[in-house]
Amino acid sequence: MRIKIFLLAIACSLGVVDSYAQKGVDNGTQFGSGEDSVRCIQNISLFVPYAKSNNFRDAYEFWKIVYEECPAATKDIYLYGVRIIAWQIDNESDPAKKAALLDDLMGVYDKRVKYFGDDARYGKDWIVGRKAQDYIRYAGDKSDPNLLYGWLKEVVNEYGNKTDALAVSLFMYSSFQKLAADENHKADYISDYLKASEILDSQIAAGSNENLVNFKQGIDNAFANSGAADCETLQNIYGAKVEQNKDNLPFLQETIALLRRMRCNEIEAYFAAAEYAHRVQPTAESARGLARQAVRKDDYATAVTFFEEAAGLEEDPTVKAEDYYMIAVIAVEQKNNARARQYALKAIEANGNYGQPYLLIGRLYAGSAASIYPNDNVLRKTVYYAAVDKFERARAVDPSIASEANGLINTYRAYFPSTEEIFMHPDLEKGQTITIPGWINERTTVR
């Protein structure tokens, strides 16, 4: 490129100097004509080497001439122009001058759109995405989300599914900022999310790469945490879309995951997506959705079957533990204490730091005291030893439930046999190990 420009400069200086001079910005040509074309080419050959070596101070004067007089000459004007202006911003301490330089930087991007916006690879959408990125970087807390949103919405609407992924991501960022400032933007934010999600999904399907997936996860997570869409809203949005895509496994899996993250896994859209996905390719998530649907219908046998299937397919031990715990809860509902304990122990086996199964077993023990010792009030109270053992174990392995465990411990310690009752009971002695009979059949210590 430099050799070509140098040769052009020589040619122009030799043969075109006396011809009619006109700047490229005036006659719409690449370099202009006559002496002005020579001036353009010479200044390109001067600013580019400086800019390439990051000597932006010396590059600026020559770059400025080219930028103003022959803006269509080369993309290097804009490639290095943003670096030159960014360098000036970084080295300026006066807030007013910084603001003026930021305007200049935005102008560089705008002029690149004007002269090179139709570039096949780095077109208007790509340029505006980088413009928005730099605006956010330098404007910081003073950035105007409405301004940002206007730039990005224009390119998203214009380019559709071909929109540069960064521009799509920042479009959602600006939409979220508008939502944070004005709740009336909620409907538009949801609409923007659906549009952005469709764009990135189509690009991932066309040729998935890590950056696209990361952009998609980013807007999904922001949407899930935005508070913009309650479950009723999501049902209205996804109810029909699930029916339209009942054979589209990627869409169904994504919908299931989104609704789960939004804690909307009790709505019909979630159940329908799980059912259709399970028909195409059973997964732990789809089985879990069918299990929840069965629970909602009080069809516990079907629910247990699908929770078992979910646990069998699940690779994450913490999630597997929750599947087993749900079966334990169903068994409690069916008043099958032994089965409830069996699955609570399977949950603990899958995740040793899961406290809820211990709490469940402890409650079952406490609730069984009267049936274990129907005719001996003192021995009946010893069952609470075994219950408290479980509550203490829950607290030890899972600090997140410590408060709940402490409440149960304090409640049931109050029911322990008194010192006088132990003294008067010939088969009990403080510190003695005893076995609680019946379905519990577990050893504990007399307090």
Image: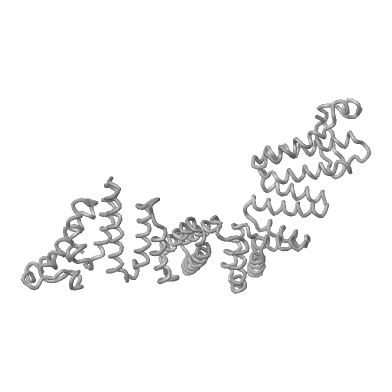
Q: Nearer the viewer, residue 98 or 395?
A: 98
Residue 226 is left or right of residue 142, and the answer is right
Position of the N terminus, as image quadrant, is: bottom left
Seen at 71% across and 63% down, the residue is 293
Toward the right, the furthest residue is: 375
Where residue 105 appears, as percent x and y from the top left, is 29, 57
Coloring scheme of the render?
one colour
Quarter occupied by residue 432: top right
Query: In the image, 106: left or right of 266?
Result: left
The answer to which image quadrant residue 441 occupies is top right
Q: On the picture, is 113 further left or further right than 35?
A: right
* Residue 375 point in image, percent of width and height: 94, 38
Left or right of 29 in this view: 109: right
Mark count: 0
Above or below — where is 325 with respect to 430?
Answer: below
Image quarter (top left, top right, bottom left or bottom right) of the C terminus: top right
